[in-house]
């Protein structure tokens, strides 16, 4: 892990992993021969990178989301920079927000996509909310892990996003008529509320994806330009 010391050390998942001896810190001038999760990558991470990770490892960049423009990514010497596809954060700071992953989430996501799920679970177990990341992104991670290369991952990502947008459009609620309002009031009776069809976590996540997915920058088929999946 390259650490630019821009985050609160008490909340930094990357530093916690370092303290536990699960990952090691790299100096800015130090070269890393494996896969590096970086916004300056030109290819999306996929199963094609499994061999590189087995032989040379996986690295992440620890910096603050608020200081991305000031972070000298191009100075980092990584042999295989890669982009992560669309994933949703489960960490307490950015819960439900697309792309704003912590260090451990970025590492875990990359490990699951390349077929190292047990390693991902081992890292996430160190955090109370860790399992929630896999739950929140279960469908996406399953799709990405089944893709043979970066192009297929991009296609899977775009397909999912388009399906989500279509689903949201179909769920638009129109104002009820006066008669419907009266019937609804009678049906709600003593409880005063209706039983939700989804959990609160699902509602928050869906709402976040709906509101923010149009703002984020994702991987595209033409340039494979990914969102800044950098830790915080």
Image: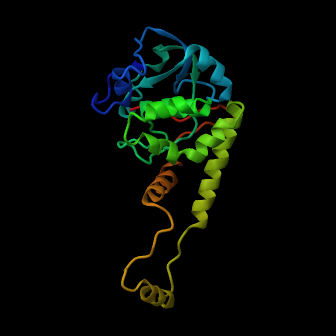
The relative height of residue 93 versus residue 204 in the rendered view (above or below) is: above
Q: Residue at x 41, y 16 (%)?
A: 24
Q: Position of residue 42 (x, y in %)?
A: 61, 25
Q: How many marks?
A: 0
* Percent of width and height locating residue 156: 67, 42
Residue 111 is situated, as x and y percent measured from the top left of the image, at 56, 30
Tell me: 22 left or right of 48.
Answer: left
Measured as percent of width and height from the top left, residue 37 is found at 52, 25
Quadrant in the picture for the N terminus: top left
- Can residue 119 be seen? yes
Place residue 144 in its image quadrant: top right
Towards the viewer: 13 or 157: 13
Left or right: where 130 falls relative to 152: left
Q: Against 195, is 15 above or below?
A: above
What residue is shown at x 39% (from left), y 41% (from top)?
91
If the image is split into quadrants, where does the C terminus sit? top left
Q: Residue 134, relative to residue 163: is it above or below?
A: above
């Amino acid at each position: 892990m390259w650490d630019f010391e821009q985050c609160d050390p008490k909340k930094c998942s990357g530093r916690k992993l370092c303290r536990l001896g699960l990952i090691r810190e790299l100096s800015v001038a130090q070269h890393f021969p494996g896969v590096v999760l970086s916004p300056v990558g030109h290819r999306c991470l996929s199963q094609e990178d499994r061999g590189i990770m087995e032989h040379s490892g996986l690295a992440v960049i620890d910096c603050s989301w608020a200081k991305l423009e000031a972070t000298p990514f191009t100075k980092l010497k990584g042999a295989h920079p890669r982009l992560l596809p669309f994933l949703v954060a489960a960490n307490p700071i950015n819960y439900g927000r697309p792309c704003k992953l912590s260090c451990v989430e970025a590492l875990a996501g990359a490990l699951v996509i390349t077929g190292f799920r047990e390693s991902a679970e081992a890292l996430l177990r160190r955090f109370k909310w860790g399992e929630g990341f896999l739950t929140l992104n279960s469908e996406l991670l399953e799709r990405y892990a089944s893709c043979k290369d970066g192009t297929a991952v991009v296609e899977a990502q775009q397909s999912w996003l388009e399906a989500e947008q279509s689903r949201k459009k179909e769920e638009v609620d129109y104002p009820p008529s006066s008669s419907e309002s009266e019937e609804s009031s009678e049906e709600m009776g003593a409880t005063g509320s209706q039983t939700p069809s989804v959990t609160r976590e699902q509602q928050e996540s869906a709402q976040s994806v709906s509101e923010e997915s149009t703002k984020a920058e994702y991987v595209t088929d033409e340039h494979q330009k990914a969102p800044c999946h950098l830790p915080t």
